[in-house]
Amino acid sequence: MMKRLKKQISTLTLLFFMCCFVLPIIPPTPAEAVEGTSLTDAQINAVIDWAYANAYGSAYSNYQCLAYVYQAYHNAIGVNIGPGGSYSSAIEASRNLELHSGEAPRGAIVFWEAAPSNSYYGHAGISVGGGRAISANVTWSKYPDQRVFDHSIEGFLLYDNSGRKLNYIGWAWPYGMIVEPISIQNNAASNITETNVYLSAKVLNNYQRVTEVGCYLSTDGVNWPYKASDAVNITDVYTNVWYDNTARDFGIALQPGTTYYYKFYAIVNGNYNEGQVGSFTTTGSIPKPPVGPIKEPVEIQNNNVANITENNAKLSAKVLNNYQKVTEVGCYLGKSQNNLNYKASDKVNIADVYTNVWYENIPSEFGMTLEPGMTYYYQFYAVVNGQTYTGSIGQFTTKKAEEKKPEVTFSNLIASNITQTDATLTAKVDNKSNSQITEIGCSLGVDEKANQWRTSSSQVGKGTNTIEFNLRQNFTKASILPGKTYYYRFYAVVNGKTVESDTKSFQLLSPEEALDKYFKALAKAVVEDKVGDLQNLLIFKGATGLGVSDADVKAAKNILGNIGDVQTVFETMRISSEHFITLGDSIGKLWVIRMESVENFMYRAKSIQDSSVNRMVKAYDLGKQDRESQTTANKAKVEESEKQIKKHCDELMADIDRKKSEFYMNFHPNLKKELNVYKKELKDLKENYDLMAFYNLGRYGTEG
C-alpha cells in the first residue's frame, strides 16, 4: 500500500504542486462522518508512534499533508480517514468530518486554513497533545530540505515560501471514529457515622487509560486540604473508586454533627478530570456545657484520676442524681480547657441516690492516643430528666517516658603498663541483653574522635566481662610514638546495634621518662636492700610497666659507661649467679660515676677557695700601690673582686642543692653529707670574706 500511494503522489505532483492532496474519492456526507466506533488509547498511541517514526527523513520530505495523515492512521491501525480511503484535500476533509473547536485532543486530526497560494487545499496534521501537532510541508529555517516537523498548533509557516502563518480552524476524528468523553458519575456518601463515611464514584473512561484516581475532602467546599489518591493503570469501560476509612485514607478524624464536602477526580490520557462536589453530615453532636450555675439536686462530684501511666489513666466521678432518672453519662477530654473535643459516653437507665461513672482505657473509650509527659483536661457530664449537667474541669499529666538504659555498658576504663611504645587498655563490659555480643573492640586515635585505628575480637558472653587490648600487639597498623598522647574508646555490637563507651586518653613515656623511671626503681631497691636476686629486679619491667626496649638498654649502657651485660640482664628470664655479679659490678661502677660527680663539686669549691686567697694577696698589693701614689685608684677594683668571689659561692651552692635532689643520690648515704660540707665551706667563705681589710692593710699598714 505504501509503495502504491507514493507512486500516485509522484504522478499527481504536477497537478497539485503545493499542499494537501491524496487519493481523490467521492466525499461522504457529514452525517456519515460522525457515525462509528471509539478509538482506544492504544490505537491513538500507535498512530502518533508511526507519525514520529516516519518524520524528519528525506523519504517523506515531499509528502503532502493529508497523505501523511492518511498513512499514519492506515498503516498504524488500519483506519481510513474517509470511506474507502481519504479526501482530495485538507479543506475537503475538514468540511466532511465533524469539526470541533478548542484544544485538539491527542491523536485527533488538526486542520488549518488555506494559504493564499493554495486556497483550495488548506493544511492538516496529527495532534500529539499539549497544544502541538506533527505535519508535512512545514517551513523550518534550520532544515530547509526537510518538511515534516513537530510544531505548535497555533499559527505556523506553511512550506510555500509565502511567509504567512496559517490559522488553526479545528480538529476532528477520522470517518467512523469517535472518542467518547470522560465523566465521573454516581458520587455517593454512605454508611455515615459520627466519625466516618463511605465515599464512592465511577469514572467512565471508555477504554481510555486511567493512571490516577482520588478524592478531595474539606469542611467548606472551597479549600480542599485533605486528599486520598491511588496510582492505577486501567483501560476498561469504567473504573470504580471508593474510600471507606477517612482517618486512614484522608488523614482526618471526622467530628460528629459536622458537614463535609468532597469531589472525585481522575487522570485519563494525561488529562485531569473532576466530578461534581458532593456533601454529607456526620451523625450525632457534642453537647455543650450549660450556661450558668448547675441547680440542685443534681451534682457531679469526686472527679478523680488514678493509675496514670505514659499513655493511659483511669477517670472517675459520682453523679448525685437523688433518685432522678439518669439516661446518659459520659466525659469530655482534650489538650485544652476550651477544646474538649474527645468524648466517651454510655446510655443508662438509673434512678438511684447516685451513679458512679468511670473510664479506664482512654485510647479505646475516647478514641484518643495519650502522649507521655502531656497535660490533659477532662469534664464529666450526665443527662438527668432530659437535662445535661456537667462537673468541674479537672486535669492530669501523663508520666514522662522512661529513658531505657542501654543493655550493654562500659566501666573502669584504664590505660596501664604505659611505656615508651606500649600500653594495656582494659575495661569492664556488662551485657544485660538476652544475646551475646557478636563483636567487641577498641578505637584509637590522636584526637578526641579516637577513630584512626580499630581492633576487635569475637564473641563475649553475657554478664560481666573484662576486655583487654595491647597497643603493640593489637594495633599493629597504628603509629606508636614515644611521648605521644592517644585517645581510646571501647565498643560492642549486640543485636546488630553498636554501643560505645566514653573516650579516655593516655600519654606514652618519653625515652627520658622511661630511663628515669627505671633508675629510680633500681636505686630504691638497692637502698632498701630489696633487690634480692635478679629475677626480682626483672619484676620492675612487668609490675611497674617499665617495658624497657632495646633502645632503652642501649641508652642505659651509654649512661652507665658501657658496664656489664645489661641487655642479658633485661632479656633473660632465668637468672643465674653470674647475672647477679654482673648487676653488682654495674651498680658499683654506677656509684663510681656518681662519686666522680660529687668530687667535681669538691674541686670547684677548692678552686673558689684558692682564688679567694690569691685575691687577698692581690688586694694587699693594690693597697700598697695607693699608699705610695697617695691615691684610691685601686679601691674600686678590690670591691669588684670581692663581689665576684661571693657570686661564685652563690652559684656553686645552688648547683649543690640541685645535685642533692637528683634521684641517684640515694645510692650512697655519704654523698649528700659530703655535698653539705662543700656547701657549708662556701657559705662560711661568703659570709666571712673581706678583701677591703687586706686593701686597707696594704694602704695604711693597718686594718683600720
Image (cartoon, helix red, strand yellow):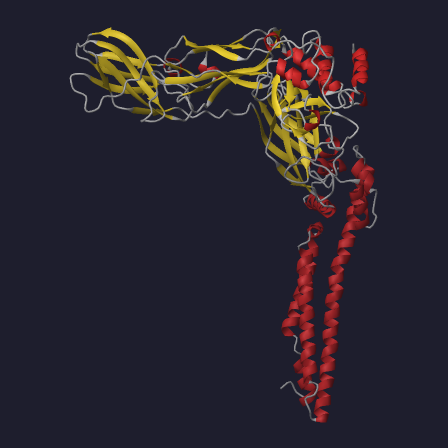
Pinpoint residue 80: horizontal percent, then vertical percent. 69, 9
Q: Is residue 246 left or right of residue 300?
A: right
User: Which is more toward the observer, 374 or 139?
Assistant: 139
Against 66, residue 491 (above or below) is below
Residue 679 visible, this orientation: yes
Numbered circles on residues, count: 0
Rendering quarter of residue 388: top left
Query: Which of the two residues, 75 or 546, is positioned nearer the viewer here?
Result: 75
Work out whether 566 lies above or below 365.
below
- Which quadrant holds residue 617? bottom right
507 relative position to 272: left or right: right
**Image: 395 above or below 588:** above
- Quadrant of the rendered structure where residue 44 is? top right
Name the quarter where the C terminus is drawn.
bottom right
Which residue occupies the extreme left position in the image? Answer: 296
Q: Nearer the viewer, residue 570 or 132?
A: 132
Q: Position of residue 569 (x, y in %)?
A: 80, 39
Q: Position of residue 433 (x, y in %)?
A: 57, 19
Residue 128 visible within the image: no
**Location of residue 522 with respect to 109 vertically, above or below:** below
Please tell me which residue lies in front, 423 or 95: 95
Image quadrant holding the N terminus, namely top right
